[in-house]
Amino acid sequence: MPQRDTKPFIIEQLKEGRFDFAAIFGNDHPVELEIGIGKGRFLINEAMRRADTNFIGIEWASRYYRMAADRAAGRHLVNIRFLRDDAAHTVNVNLPDASLSALHIYFPDPWPKTKHNKRRLIQAPFVAQAARVLRDGARVLLATDHEDYAQQMEREFSDSRDFTLASRLIGPDAPEGITNWEQKFRKEGRTMFKFEFLRKVR
Ligand SMILES: C[S@@+](CC[C@H](N)C(=O)[O-])C[C@H]1O[C@@H](n2cnc3c(N)ncnc32)[C@H](O)[C@@H]1O
């Protein structure tokens, strides 16, 4: 259970309507979103490293989301907020058009059984919504250890007329910060697949 006051770090779920990021953060700095933050290691490190950027983390598991908010509170960060929701709902319903400067999705649940593949987050409707909420030139950073999901990620974003592939990496090197799962997978020597796409200019 959290030891600190995590309320200032929480964005309440919104069934309908769009978030007002300027009101939430009290400034108009660029906003980056991470979906499925786990314990929040990547996003908290980024918020500490880049004070002029605002960060939002969405996490479905309440235990993890509370843990991440507690960690942010312990570091007195002013540029990070957390939301407990289904990421697809948040992106589809709550995010304003052209409101994000980057989207981070690291090791999303792969739903490996064929009959469960339809539950994967990264599918054509999600990619269309990502195109709506990202600013021109915004970055999408993706990672997975699951080869079939890696192929699906690359295919869905490459098939979209709104994105262009900027980099494709297979192996352990992380171009940016490292998540908890990446750390675990590195120790296990697993192959990892990483992609960076850019939102084309409208
Ligand atoms: C495999 S973990 C990876 C966590 C973190 N990205 C990392 O690399 O350490 C996937 C995370 O995504 C969360 N998650 C899965 N589906 C979600 C959804 N629809 N909305 C929000 N979070 C979700 C899970 O609860 C879990 O914490």
Image (cartoon, rainbow, N blue to C red):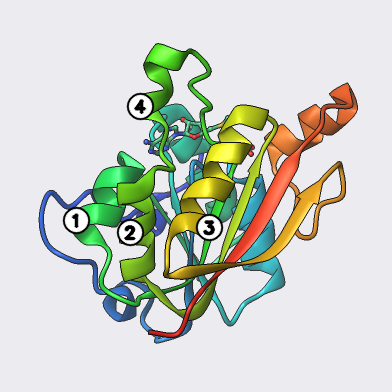
Count neighbours of disc 4 (C-alpha within 10 A) and say few if under 14, some if 14 to 19, many if 20 or more: few
Work out how far the residue at label 4 is from the one at label 3, CA to CA, in angstroms: 19 Å
- Report if the beta carbon of the residue with label 3 is closer than 8 angstroms to ligand 1: no
Residue at the spot of label 4: 118
* Amino acid at pointer 3: Ser
Work out how far the residue at label 1 is from the one at label 3, CA to CA, in angstroms: 24 Å
Question: x, y percentage for residue 50?
Answer: 66, 74
Q: Please state which of residues 149 and 175 is positioned toward the viewer in this rendering.
A: 149
Q: Is residue 107 visible?
A: no
22 horizontally vs 114: left or right: left
* Amino acid at pointer 4: Lys
Depth-wise, is mark 4 or mark 3 nearer the camera?
3
The numbered mark, 3 or 2, whose residue comes first in the sequence reads 2
The numbered mark, 1 or 2, whose residue comes first in the sequence reads 1
Depth-wise, is mark 1 or mark 4 nearer the camera?
4
The numbered mark, 4 or 2, whose residue comes first in the sequence reads 4
Residue at the spot of label 2: 128
Residue at the spot of label 3: 158
Depth-wise, is mark 1 or mark 2 nearer the camera?
2
Residue at the spot of label 1: 93
Q: Residue at x 73, y 55 (%)?
A: 168
Q: Please state which of residues 107 and 76 is positioned toward the viewer in this rendering.
A: 107
